[in-house]
Image: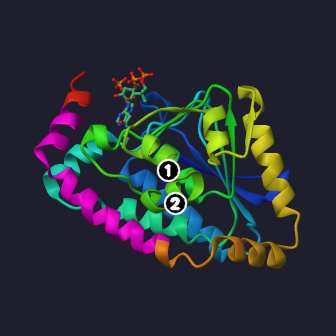
Amino acid sequence: MTDHILVERSESAPHIQIIRFNRPDKKNAITRAMYRSMTDALKDADDTPDIRVNVFLGTEGCFSAGNDLADFLALSRSGGMGREIVDFLVALASARKPVVSGVDGLAIGIGTTLHLHCDLTVASDRSLFKTPFVDLALVPEAGSSLLAPRVMGHQRAFALLALGEGFSAAQAREAGLVWKVTAPDAVEAETLSLAAKLAAKPPEALAIARNLMRGAPDAVLSRIKEEAEQFAARLQSAEARAAFEAFLKR
Ligand code: COA
């Protein structure tokens, strides 16, 4: 467990597990250790009947700036996409409890694609969703090449994932990535209130309803693996390495 991911259970909402990005000095950029903590938390929720809902939150003004680019540079030298990243994506795509997220501010890369796996997302009106994968000489991940066109149609998904266009909270809501837009200071309360409503439902009926709506995760899991192979190859490319170095040398 790292302090950069806080896993919280509040006394007022005992059935809710909060997984919070807590690395604000680095805009909550996600390291391999942070992925490991999040995977453990999701697996723990699956195995703990008392936990009924998972909630992802960030810090004030920032959900996450995506994968840590220093880690990507290290991976581009050592090879692979990073076992911890793939393990997290698999755990997220196959999580058996509902997942709710609350975004205030920046949501970049996996900070955006994570919500494609969520059942409900709340965003503040100052949020920005952006996936500069192709600009970094990478490809979409987290099953987003399958899920985003499904959720928002090909052209909007292409604008998000290939063009690297930033989506405002309103655009993300219109695209179906976000359920509700609120003021920044209302994001957490609204997110936790939705999670509490879900946690109060009969858990078995909720699980069945959710499974019926989501279907088997097989296609998403196989796309995550397919993307990971391409992603790992792209990480080794000279153009990706140059993009990471350019960011880190700014
Ligand atoms: N990986 C590693 N460090 C990151 C990071 C990332 N993805 N995003 C931000 N940081 C670090 C910065 O290096 C900086 O560290 P420093 O203070 O030690 O120099 C700190 O977080 C603050 O970031 P900064 O760029 O100064 O903040 P900003 O408000 O001007 O810009 C962003 C915020 C998110 C727009 C900008 O940091 C950015 O573009 N980050 C990269 C996003 C990205 O490409 N993610 C990967 C997607 S696949």
Give the residue at x 85% y 50%.
12
Which residue in the structure is indicated by mark 1? 113
Q: Residue at x 19, y 58 (%)?
A: 233
Taking the image in four quarters, ligand 1 sits in the one at top left
What secondary structure is the stretch in magenta mostly built from?
helix
Q: Is residue 221 above or below residue 132?
A: below
Contact flag, marks 2 and 1 (Cβ < 8 Å): yes
Name above or below for residue 191 compared with residue 27: below
Please state the horizontal and vertical placement of residue 169, each as a whole percent of the image: 63, 33
- The structure residue drawn at horizontal position 62% and vertical position 76%, both measured from the top left corner, is 215
In the rendered structure, which amino acid carries the disc numbered 1?
Answer: Thr
In depth, the one of 40 and 212 nearer the eye is 212
In the image: residue 196, left or right of residue 129 = right
Q: Which mark is residue 147?
A: 2
Label 2: how many residues lie within 10 Å, few (<14), some (14-19) or many (20+)?
A: some
Is any atom of residue 4 visible in this view?
Answer: no
Q: CA distance from mark 2 to mark 1?
A: 9 Å
Q: Residue 237 in magenta?
A: yes
